[in-house]
Amino acid sequence: MTEKNYTVVTQFILLGLTDHADLKVVLFVLFLVIYAITLLGNPSMIILIRITPKLHTPMYFFLSCLSFVDACYASSIAPKMLINFLVVKGTISLSACMVQHLCFGVFITTGGFLLSVMAYDCYVAIANPLLYGVAMSKRQCAGLVIGSRICGTVNSLVHTVSLSRLSFCRLNVVSHFFCDIPSLLKLSCSDTTVNELLLLTFSGIIAMATFLVVMVSYMFIVLAILRIHSAAGRWKAFSTCASHLTAVTIFYGTLSFSYIQPSSQYSVEQGKVVSVFCTLIIPMLNPLIYSLRNKEVKEAVKRALEMKRFHC
């Protein structure tokens, strides 16, 4: 076919999770509830930390930042996904697709860095409690959060810029519910070798670096806990990091299952399932994990509810 017969793509059709009308209604209700819980839980966690002086510590400062990031990257995907459940053919413009990809990449990468920062914070709190105030000062905490956001922004910009330089012609049907980069690379009529290399390299390096920080931090945490003589002391130290360990396991488990692989080995259905966890389930679960498994947060919630009843 000659070049003049190619049609430049200006919008994509998102196939979504299903094409069955009845199932679309069920999924719309389900994911609307999940997204509502996300928008309720994460801002509530931020507000709770702000109004509770006992929670004005580095650990909860990082948790409030993580809650903000969770709400943002869920919001970069969920609204469009929900709208597409209600229409016959879900579409998204090329420019909107790039913006969605940029926002999602910034926030989810920032979330990964924040989780590694929180692992380091747990290590300092348990292994070096006397130096905790110095090692995790307000300036240090702010620097770690800003650094996480810069790394997330740079990573996402690299992929988005390289993606925007590709040509899309004829094929415009994305076998996904959002602008996921492996699905878009399959549609391009340009050479995607550089994009695949960037995806594999950046995703691999970032995932391995942050995961290594988490693993090394927890290795020293375990050693520090084993040096504690009393069983009560060991349990108290472990419970400090139990919520974070759960969140880390879910986050890295789902991401490594999908993104750190060449696009030739990429399964669309596998990607959809993992992406649902990344974009909707994890942002909903994190506030629940940190509230249900954290004694200080549960006590703060209880006090907040008692104060509300008192004022009523």
Image (tube, rainbow, N blue to C red):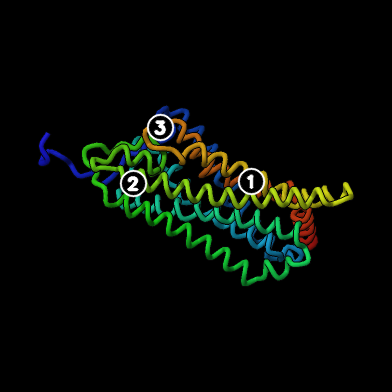
Q: Is residue 62 above or below residue 173?
A: below
Name the secondary structure under disc 2: helix
Quickly name the residue at label 1.
Answer: 247
Residue at image location 67% in from the left, 49% down from the top: 244
Q: Which quadrant of the figure contains the C terminus?
A: bottom right
Residue at mark 3 to residue at mark 2: CA–CA distance: 15 Å
Quickly name the residue at label 3.
Answer: 265
The amino acid type found where label 1 is placed reads: Ala
Q: Position of residue 13 (x, y in %)?
A: 32, 39
CB within 8 Å, label 1 to label 3: no
Q: Earlier in the sequence, mark 3 or mark 2?
A: 2
Residue at image location 57% in from the left, 63% down from the top: 145
Q: Earlier in the sequence, mark 2 or mark 1?
A: 2
Q: Is residue 73 visible?
A: no
Q: Earlier in the sequence, mark 1 or mark 3?
A: 1
Q: Which quadrant of the figure contains the N terminus?
A: top left
- Please name which of the two marks, 2 or 1, marks the residue nearer to the observer: 2
Quickly name the residue at label 2.
Answer: 195
The amino acid type found where label 3 is placed reads: Gln
Q: Is residue 138 above or below residue 27?
A: below
Q: Position of residue 133 (x, y in %)?
A: 73, 69
Residue at image location 73% in from the left, 64% down from the top: 52
The amino acid type found where label 2 is placed reads: Asn
Q: Is residue 23 above or below residue 7?
A: above
